[in-house]
Amino acid sequence: MNLDKYFSLGDQVALVVGASRGIGRAIAEALGEAGARVVLAARSLDKLEAVAAAIRGQAAQASTLRLDVADPASISAGVEQVLRDHGRLDILVNVAGTNIRKRAEDYTLEEFDAVLSTNLRGIFRVTQVVGAAMKRQRKGKIINIGSLTTTLGFPYLSVYAVTKGGLGQLSKVLAVEWAPYNIQVNVIAPGFILTDLTREMWQREDMRDWLAATQPNPRLGTPEDIAGMAIFLASPASDYITGQVIFVDGGNTAGSRWPFQPSA
């Protein structure tokens, strides 16, 4: 079997929005290793340059782009720059996001708007602009990063869950709308992944004990656990897969473990 036929991303142009750390960084590095020309986008160019240097150190191609998903003008200018520099855009990975954990009754409207402007409105605008270019070239892969809250409810995440649930439905609609243009749109929904943003929470012993007692695979995930699925969804191997929410979650959404044991 010629695996390059299925999984190589040679000479593909990939834009990773939110590539400066965590899951975004791991996906960007994996795309580079698979042969893609990776454009790393985020608000902070300093952090992006360090990631790009690491990718180039592996003999892969990487460049950086300042892009603020909460700013529509920044989105339009950034995508236009990618198209000018590379002539096309084959892969879009939307990782950028923010979160505020609070009791539902304590959120202010300003906090609600802040989370939605990044996680949903901003991601929609990026996808809208990139999707128009992909329609013109009649080819594209769009990968959105969801969450367990795309389908499950967890307390103190009401506004975040609104955005991730909305992202799941948006992806399904776009998958149907853009399928005639050979564009595939899918969601990776990570489970509990250890990143800089979640490290403090998972230092608590009661949280680790809860996970180990309930999740089928009792360990925390890593950003690299997500990167492999991103390569698959960006590659020709997934050309007949679209509109799917794929959970990479240690079996969390499959069910939970319990103390019952069958009799001998």
Image (spheres, grey):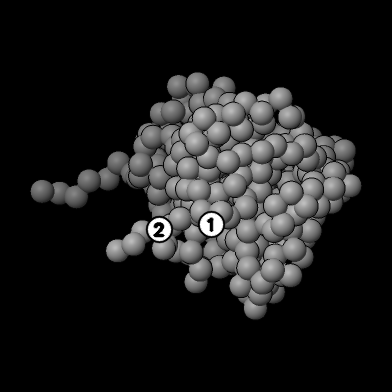
Dividing the picture into quarters, in which one does residue 110 lie? top right
Marks 2/1: CA–CA distance: 13 Å
- List x then y, in percent, for residue 93: 63, 50
Q: Quadrant of the N terminus?
A: bottom left
Circle 2: element type: helix
Crowding near the residue tagged with mark 1, few <14, some 14–19, many ≥20 C-alpha atoms within 10 Å: many
Which amino acid type is marked by label 1? Ala
- List x then y, in percent, for residue 52: 61, 33
Which amino acid type is marked by label 2? Asp
Q: Viewer-proximal residue, 179 or 176?
A: 179
Q: Is 253 positioned to the left or the right of 39 in the image?
A: left
Q: Is residue 177 above or below residue 232?
A: below
Disc marking residue 234: 1
- List x then y, in percent, for residue 14: 62, 50
Dividing the picture into quarters, in which one does residue 210 lie? top left
Disc marking residue 184: none
Q: Is residue 141 above or below residue 117?
A: below
Question: Which residue does the image show at 58% across and 36% down from the upper left?
Answer: 25
Q: Is residue 46 above or below residue 31?
A: above
